[in-house]
Each structure stands twice: as structure tokens, then as C-alpha cells.
Image: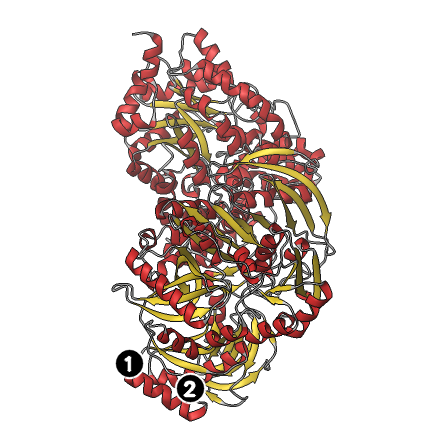
Amino acid sequence: MTRQTQDKDMRITPQDLRRRGVREILDKIRRADGYYVTNTERDLSQSDFKNRIMPHTQLLVAPQRNDAGFFSLEITGGASVHVDMLRKQMSPLEKLEVLSANMPDTLFQTLCRGVNLFGYRPYPDNVIRLTVRSFARWVHVWRVFDFLNHIPNMVSVFEEVREAGAILEPSICFSTGPEHTDAYYVRKVGEILEVTGEDILLCIKNHGGLGTPRRIGALVGAIRERYPELVIHYHGHNTDGADLGRIVAAVKNGAKIIDASDHALTGFYGPPPLLTAVDILRDEGHEAVGLNRQAVIDASNLLRGEREHYRDFESQFLGFDPTAQIHKLPGGATGSSFEQAVKGGFLHRMPHILQRELPLVHTELGNWWSVTPGSQILWTTAVNNVLKGARYRDANDDLKNLMLGRYGDFPFHRPADSIYEAVFGKDWKTILERDGGYQRIEDIDIAVERKVLEHRIGRPATDDELVLYLQHPNDAVNFFKFEAKYGKTWVLSPDIWFRKGGYGLGDKFEIPDAFGRLHAIEIGPQRRTKTGDAVTYLVIDHHPEQILTEMEAEGAQVKKKVTFTPREIEALAKTGDIRSQIIGTVSEVPVAEGEEVSAGQVLIVLEAMKMLNNVVAGISGRVAEILVAPGDRVEVGDPLLLVRSE
Amino acid sequence: MKEKAIRKILIANRGEIALRILRTVKELGKGAVVVYEKPDSEAYYIRLADTAILIGEGPRCDYLDIERIIWAARKSGADAIHPGYGFLAENADFSEACENAGLIFIGPPPGVIRDLGNKVVARRIAAQAGIDTIPGTGDLPRGEDGVAAALKFGLEHGYPIMLKASSGGGGRGIRKVVSEKDLLVQLPLARQETLSAFNDENIYVEKCVESPRHVEIQILADRHGRIMHLGSRDCSIQRRHQKLLEIAPANLPADVLEAMYAAAIAAARQAGYVNAGTVEFLVDAHSHAFWFMEMNTRLQVEHTVTEELTGVDIVREQIRIAEGQVLDIPRERIHLMGKAVQVRINAEDPKNNFMPEGGKQVEVYQSPGGPGVRLDGVVYQGYRVPTEYDSLMVKMTIRGYNWEQTIQRLKRALQGFLIVGPATTVPFYLAICDEPDFQAECFDTGYLDTHQDIFLYPEQEREVAKLAKLIAEIHARKVNPFAY
């Protein structure tokens, strides 16, 4: 057997998973003479591009990535589900559907925050289960974690992933410090295996890029020693520039899957370049199984040209940050913390916040794992402590809930009493007694939620829309409204989507639509209306059209013309508010004010197009007011007459 | 009778039919004069005329003002008037006024219009020509006697019955009555409606043939006693007695059609008919028995299907007949093979009872072309759908080798329309194209009532328009507010 065909054989595909099941796939990974590579695009996008890598770019390189022979493409989860709707204006589920159609041979992977799903706070159990079932249609590998490594927070997701026939990858979040010993982590792995059984991948989740290569090597070795059959997937960030070393150490000690990404997109806080890891490891005698090296290069060749469109979303602060070992912020939060510092005007205090206060807060609060949502709690607390000059004052609810044990047990130690007192006041003991304890979120009535959603969007909702709504209700509704107005804009290239300063007069470009048609757009002149709105002339498919953009002027009243649909007019008629269904002329008013009328009786005769139309009473009652007279012209929705039921 | 060449024709109409007539007038190298009411100042047809004369503030009164029109003809030096359809087209007084003013009226003489315009007289003429008519009354007396007469007719012939305006036409002034109680409600309404629409409150009652087919024969008659037919049209697909879609020829056995041709010519001869006219029949969908309904003394909206089928320009023949020329089209040149269908692209919302979209602006207008497609339209990008007049934007007539090709072509051509702004009948016609009974060429006047599913068509979404809206917004705001 040639190396090539063996490689092809050793590749793991969705078809393979469907046919053979999780257990056999895991066996295949165990038996493989080498290791597998996951392309962690989602984490790269989140850490180095504020989650903005657009579907257009992903589709552009879909053929190359599909040929690359990755173990998986991590393409959803984390904050991306929210950002897909909030800033990319795309359904995260539709994204998966479209991409999977274009990458049929590649497993898709997600990062799920256990009970927090893809959000920041715990969700009701029935929402968790519904969500996992929905995403599992497209997602084959489920990395699941909890910021306290609290296993009960992950159990529902575990069960649903199993049920869906997908590969479960529970994580142990990794950090450093005196408590973070091999013995602790090996014990944690044992606890997970007790819940899940052996048919899992185990993720060592090093979101902060912490520890040295030696430290990671030792941890992998220790777990492998206790559980030699366990397939270990090492995930790290390159914040300090040393993740390649950690990857090499992990593989040399028996890790079977590593995380890295396309070199053309690598930055400072996300995953390191995939090909570099592969080349170093080859020299160390470890082969990347199934990997098509040329396809990886081809993908990056294409991505290089795209990167310039994302420049606005790269961190303002370039360069590796070895102090990550001190502040321990996850790679996904590093860029955004600097962004907040700039916006909040405390950039000059960042060294103090990151290198003094944050490590102190981290230790004081229990030295658990700085990852969502814990990392936000640590970061916010540290910033507050510094900016307010008084520590642990005005704590937010998330910190309070954490300290009350609602998110789970503290893994090592509880914060000191003095911190409880600072947060909850003198009565902190009573409060802790009364309100403390693990919090289970009650199931919600999903049928009711659907009704609320449908009311908000004014039409029936699809199952997918319901799932998205349950994640982030307001942002989902805004997205649905956006899509109704602007269509499926994910087809647009980042050059169009992120364009600043407008387009040039006479600029011509082709855009596809989501239904496979190609359109030609030419930018024409623009003018302002008297009310300050913009009118843009576009030549669409060779025909000129003018498009109005309502520009809300500062302080100006939002002008709103009331219009009624026929259904609304009928509904109003049932309340006695009789309005015109047509544009016409009042021909006759056969009733008088004060007259008793019965439902069905003719109230007004309208003439339109030389036809006489009877307007009849929707209810019985007394004519309270007649608002029109014969000869009046009426528009659709104009009030004609009021009937008051006695 | 001696021939008199017409030099300049005044078109006493508006909209698409003014343009239609104007096109033939130009082909004949004659002068074309149009008139318009103020609300029509932006109308397309007046741009194409040699002379356009403002006849008043309107709406819908100056087009009906015989004196104004005669004045405009004198002023412009026109020597003939074509009335189009609607307005003064079937007004005997107008035809007479033209004669008195020394103007050639391109249509039948006043006496013929007067006779045939009265449904009761028309039915008598048909009967004299030996053609079956639907049982009916004469003009109902006013007041209680009329009510009593109608009730008596209903009792004799059974319900439903039809209330018809004696001066009605074009599907207007017709009401179906299902019971005695209904009759008492509708009779006064019908009287009032017919008075305001036709300035004549006479109505009569007719037996209602349930779900019949509506088939009409186009005829031409010259001043020399020659009468010929141009085949049939099926106009069964209607809503509220207004035609929506017309087909030539009607899908009937040859012997039935031949009998109808003969009846139509006999009726025209009996009436002393001159110029183009249409004899309308009700046809029993099963037995193919037919009854004379009425004769229209004008050019019809749907004349285009006959033109496309036969190759005869009816307006051209109307002018030649009016000039006193001999109708000399050889019978063998009249092509009656294949199919033609006309649809009316109206600015109306079929889902909302075909409510006109008056006042709306046509933001985008793109129309189809290619084989077998004829457009008679007045719409353009920026066109405002008038609230003062009808909502017809463009008539599309499709010609095909057979029914199957014709509806395939119709569908293809309908898909070629892009009209943004008002709701239109385009998606409604597209839904009809996909309906199996229509595809099987099987329909009667009850078609819409029995095929309500047609109205469930999806709203036409235009994805690129949505994307363009965003691109315009990014351009206007200099940044994409939804991305940052």
C-alpha cells in the first residue's frame, strides 16, 4: 500500500462516521500511525479577527480545506453563534448547512460551553437539549467544557451529543498554579470517564496558551499513563508564541489530535500555523495522518489575498504576549480586552490591570479557569477594582452568582470571607446561607417562546429560527428582520460587506445571490432628499434603479405613515372602527348617527372603478360617528364610521 | 358610396388603446391627434402623437364630453375620430355628432349603435336573425312594478338570475341574484350603479346560465354589405364579469364554431352593421349550445388576440372601412391556426380582491421580449399608477403554435416582467399557468371561483433588490452599520 492510499484510507469523513459509528472511528484514530490535525478556524477568527471571517471567505477556500484532510474543521460554537447573527447577519445554522454542502468530506467541530451553550449564562435544560439536537445535524465533533470543570454543567450536552451519534469531546480546562497538578487533572479525567464511558475524545483545553512545552508534555503523559487508550486532543493558543512547542510536546507524549490553522490567517492570540507544526513533527518522526500538505498551502494562498479585508478586526496591538502566563486571559479575550481599554480610556493602566490586579483577583477568587464566562468575571472585577479604587465593590450579578455557588463548586478553595463581605456586605453569611447553592434553571415552555417569537416577527417561525431565538432572543429577532429586508447577505464578499467610505461612482461588481444567480451592480450617483434621506442610483443587471436609504437625522422625529393591511382593517371592523378597504369615493351613507345597526347592515356605499361596494357593519350597535360624506375620496385605511356596541 | 381618404385622425381615448390606435394611424402615414385630461399630462401616448390637445381638468368627464372632443377635432384639423373602447365608443349621440360635424366616425353609424346598445332591442334583432337568446325581460318599469316584474321572472325561470344594465357593457352593470330576498337588496343598487355609470337607469333581467363559457366572434363589415368574421375568442376567465384573460380561438368543435360564425354574421347583417364589432355568446360548457348575449359596437380590449392569430390589423381595417373602402381580405389569408392569449398586467392586488394600486409609483419596469410576445402598454420606469383612471399598465399577447407552447411561452414571458412598486397581476397569471385545468384548456366563467388555490401564489421576492438595498445603505452611510 502506498503512503498516498493509506493516507486516504486513514482520513475520517462524515460518511465514515455515519457508516461506522463513534467507537470504530475512535479505534481508527488510536490505531493510526501518527496524529490528526483540526483546523480551528472559529477560534482563529474569534481570537485574531473578532469573529468576523465571513462565509464568503470560508466558501472561497472550501474546496482546498475539504481536500486538506483535516480531522475536523472547528467552524462554529464559542462566541461565533452570537456574532454570526449580530455582526455577520447570517443564521449560524444556515452557515453550517451551506458550508457542509461545500465541504462534504470534512467533519465539523464546535466549542460548546456546557450549560452556557454558546452564550454567557446557564440555559434551561430543555433549551440545551433542543439546541444540541439542532446543531448536531451539521456538527460531528462536540468539544464541551465548563469554566469550573464542573461536570454536572456538561451532562445534558453529553447526553444529547451521544444521542445524535456525534463524537463527544469533553474538555479539561487547563491552567497553571500550585493547584493545577497532574494528579488533579488525572482525577478530573477519571470523573469525566465515569459519566461518559470510554468512547470519547478528551480535550486538554489550553485557551490561555499557558504552561511550557514541558508542562503540557508531562500532563499528556500523566493522563496517558493512567488511561492509555484515551484519545487526547490538545487545544492551545499561541498568545505567548510558544504553542508550537506545546503541540510538539503533546504529540511526543501521545496526543492524537492537535489544533492549528491556516498560516495565512494566523495572528498572535489564536492557534499557530498548522503547516509549521506538521513540519516540525515530521522531523520528530510523527506524521499528520490523512493530511494533504499541498491543499493546506493552496488554501492559504487564497486566504492571503482576503486578509486585507479583515484588517479592521485584527487587534490594534500586534505582537506576542508572554505575559499571558501572568494574566492568563484566554486568547479569545485578549484582543477585546485591549479594545475595551482603548474605548474606556484606561489603556495606560493595562500593565497594572493585567500583570498585578488580574492575577491577584484570579488567585483570590479560587484560581479556577479563566475562560468564558469566568474570564469575563475575572476581567470585569479586576478592571472595576482598579478603576473604582475600592476592591470588590459594586460587584455584578455574575460574580455574586459565582460566589453563591450557583454555577458550581469552587474546585480548589472558596474566596476569603473578607471578599464575601466586600461583595455582599455585613450580612454575607446570611445571604450565602439563604441564597447559596447550585442553581438549576427551570425548563421553559418552548411552545410559548415560539408564540412570542412569532408575534415579534409577525409570521410563523421555522424550527431553526426558534433555536436561534432561544440563544439570543433580541439579537435573533433583529437578525430575522434584517434578513427579511436585506436578504441573505452572507453571499457578499468582505470587500463589499466591510467597505468604508462608500463605493466609487461607476464602480462595477458582480454579486451572487444565495440562490445561485449572478447579478451585475454598478454604482451610480447619490443625492439627498429634502428630509435628508439618501437616494442612490444603482444599475442592477443593466437597469437603473433608485434606492432610498432612510437616514435618521439627529433629533428628528421618526416619520411614520400608518398603513393597514386588509386583515387589520377587518379586525378593526370587528371593534366597530369601520375603515375603507379600497381607494374610492363615498357614494352614499344610508345610516345616520345614533341609528341602531346590526352586523351585516350596509353602512356606507363606496364607488371605485364604477362599481358600488357596500361597507357593512362588523358588529351590531349604534352609529357613534360618521366621518365621511358622499363625494369624499377615501384611501385604504381611512376611517369612515364608528359603531359602538351597547 | 364613394371613398373618402382620411388624412388626420383624432383618437378620442387615453391609455394603452390610444397608443394602440396611434401606432396603426402612423403606419398608414396619417396624422395622429390625441386628446387628454389634465391628470393624463404625463401619459406616454401623448408623447407619440403629432398633436396633443388638453381638453379639460378631468378626470373622466372631458373624455366623455362630446362637444369638447368635436372642438378638439376642429381645432386640430382632424377629419375622422376613432373612439377606442369605453368612454364615447358606444355612444350613438357621439357618432351622430361626428356625422353632423362632417367628421368621419370610425365605428358603426348612430342607429346601429343605438339599437345594439340597448340590450332589449339587440336581443330582438338577434331573434329576428334566428339566433337563440337567453330568456329575459324587457326594460323593467321603474318602482314597484319593476320589482314585481323581476320577481315574476325569477319565479318563472328560477334563480339565479342576472340583473343587467340596458346600456351596460364591458362587464359592468351586471349583478347576479340568487334569491328573492337578494333581488330586493340588489335591484336598487343596480339601478343606482347603472345610472351613475351609463347615465341610464334602465335595467332588465335575464336567466342565468350557470358557469357557461363566454365566447365571442369578431366580425368586420364594410359599407358595401360585405361581412366577414375573424374567428372566435374565449373570454371565460373573468372576475366579477370583468375579463382577465382571453384566448383565440375558442377551444370548441369546428362545427360549433362554424355555427357561431354564421350566427354572428347573420346578427350583424340583421342589424345593418358597419365596421368592426363583436358578437358575444354564452356557450354551455357541456352541450356546446350557445345563446346570443349582446353585440359590442366597438374595438374590444382583447382584439389583440384576434390580430395575433389572424394576422389582420383590425384598426387598419376599421379605418379603411370608414374611408368607404371595400373589405377585400381574401378568406384564405385569415389564419385561424395556433393559439393566442392576452393577459392584462394591471397594477392591482389580486389577493386583495384586485384592488387597484392607484397612486403607486413604478420604481422598476422591465418587460419581456422574444418570439411570440406582443406588448401594448403605457407603463415605464417612474410611471405613477393613476387613481383617476383604470389600473391597466400593459397588455401582453402571446402567440404560439398550439396551446401547450402558448402557455409555456406565456409563463416564460411573464417571468420576464420585473415591476417594482405596485402589486401586479403578474404572479396571479403565473399561478394560472401552473394550474392543471388551465393547462388542459378546460375552464368556464366559474373558473376563478372553483380554483381559489390560484390566489395562494407566493409573493415574488427579488433577492438582488434586497442585496442592492444594503449596498446602497453601505454607500450612503459610508460604513456597514450591521457589520461593525
Residue linked to disc 1: B158
Q: What is the distance, in whole Å, between disc 2 and disc 1 at their CAs?
A: 18 Å
> In terms of sequence position, does the residue under pointer 2 or pointer 1 come before the other?
2
Quadrant for residue A287, please give it: top left
Crowding at mark 1 (Cα within 10 Å: few <14, some 14-19, many 20+): some
In the rendered image, the quadrant that contains the N terminus of chain B is: bottom right
Residue linked to disc 2: B140
Instruction: Name the residue type under label 2.
Output: Leu
| Place of residue A169 in the rendered image (x, y in percent of width and height, measured from the top left) | 37, 30
Label 2 in the same subunit as label 1: yes
With respect to residue A214, does A124 lie above or below?
Answer: below
Say which of marks 2 and 1 sits in front.
Answer: 2
Q: Nearer the viewer, residue A137 or A254?
A: A137
Furthest residue in direction bottom, as rendered? B144
Crowding at mark 2 (Cα within 10 Å: few <14, some 14-19, many 20+): some
Q: Residue at x 42, y 33 (%)?
A: A110
Give the SS element for disc 2.
loop
Label 2 resides on the chain identified as B
With respect to residue A505, does A127 lie above or below?
Answer: below
As drawn, the label of residue A533 is none
Instruction: Name the residue type under label 1.
Output: Gly
In the rendered image, the quadrant that contains the C terminus of chain B is: top right
Q: Residue at x 47, y 53 (%)?
A: B329
Give the SS element for disc 1.
loop
Q: How is the rendered protein coloured?
A: secondary structure
| Place of residue A8 in the rendered image (x, y in percent of width and height, measured from the top left) | 34, 16
